[in-house]
Image (tube, helix red, strand yellow):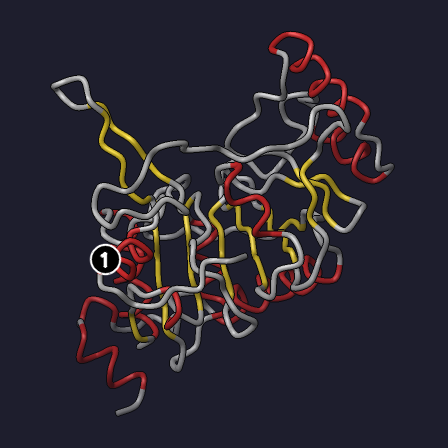
Amino acid sequence: MGVRALIEERGAAFEGYTFGFLDDMAKREIRRAILKGVAIPGHQVPFGSREMPIARGWGTGGLQITLACVGADDTIKVIDQGDDASVNAVNLRRLIAKTTGARETLTTGDATLIQTRHRIPEERMTAGQMLILQVPIPEPLRHVERSVAAARAMHAEADYARMWLALYEDVVRNGEVTAGAGYPVMVNHRFVMAPSPIPRWDIPKLDQAETLFLFGAGREKRIYAVPPYTDVKPLEFEDYPFSIEGFPGMSCRRCGATDSYLVTSPQADGSTLSVCSDASYCDDVLGGRKVVNQW
């Protein structure tokens, strides 16, 4: 069965749309922006962000990249904070599958394209996969420089003194760098980049990874990338090194894992319930399946 026939069979509501929802001109523009982003790792490339059937701020940038790159032979996985079953993840996955005929999966290892909001899977991704991150604010200098023009000039001149000063002031006030989600990183020894609001736990996964990372900000109209085998280093001082979140003495309530990123919630009796943020990884461990978890 052809792709068009498959789309018609899955729902008449999508009749008349081009493959992957976006028109060919839009997809070509996005692909050109992606290629430029790959050629200049960490550099923010402007693009003409289109109106999508979801509100801006709900992943339109990542969705446009996904729809511009996906093919009928791809297998798509969509996660929201590590969860495949959230309303956002389910509906984005359904839209992608219905307009392209791509297969759906909840398993990280089976996916060729993974669109994610604020998490990188625990399972090590391979060279045949692509991770697309939704980004709310792509400009890492936003909290130290409000002017867009001035921030662009700072990137052009590799002038990140104010970013380093902000980190230093954080150390002076708090005794350590307290920046959490979206910790700033230096890409390929050149650009400071916002890695989307992923936890610090995921930052080391970006460094010298086999996978292509693409970042899309629909509201801010920016695309940027981290190609495979690229140096990605968190900003840190020699005497105040970067560190990831720790969960000493804690394990997942479902699968018992101690080597994954845990999310916790307080219970009525005063105790704390901890589970794996990555639902797919948790299910694999619970089912006794082998998971490659070393990035």
On the image, the x and y values in percent for residue 47 come to 61, 52
Other-residue count near label 1 (Cα within 10 Å), few / some / many at <14 / 14–19 / ≥20: few
Point out the residue furthest to the bottom here: 1
Q: Amino acid at mark 1?
A: Leu
Q: Name the quarter where the C terminus is drawn.
A: bottom right
In the image, residue 248 sits, relative to residue 50, either above or below, namely above
In the image, residue 163 sits, relative to residue 293, either above or below, namely above
In the image, residue 255 sits, relative to residue 243, either above or below, namely below
Question: Image quarter for residue 228?
Answer: bottom right
Instruction: Report the residue at 24% width, 55% height from top.
Output: 90
Q: For mark 1, what is the residue?
A: 286
On the image, the x and y values in percent for residue 107 come to 32, 66
Point out the residue furthest to the left here: 268
Residue nearest the observer in this picture, 40 or 232: 232
- Helix, strand or loop status at disc 1: helix
Point out the residue furthest to the front here: 249
On the image, the x and y values in percent for residue 203 come to 57, 44
Instruction: Report the residue at 66% width, 61% height from top.
Output: 227
Question: Image quarter for residue 103?
Answer: bottom left
Instruction: Report the residue at 50% width, 32% height from top.
Output: 181
On the image, the x and y values in percent for residue 283 come to 25, 58
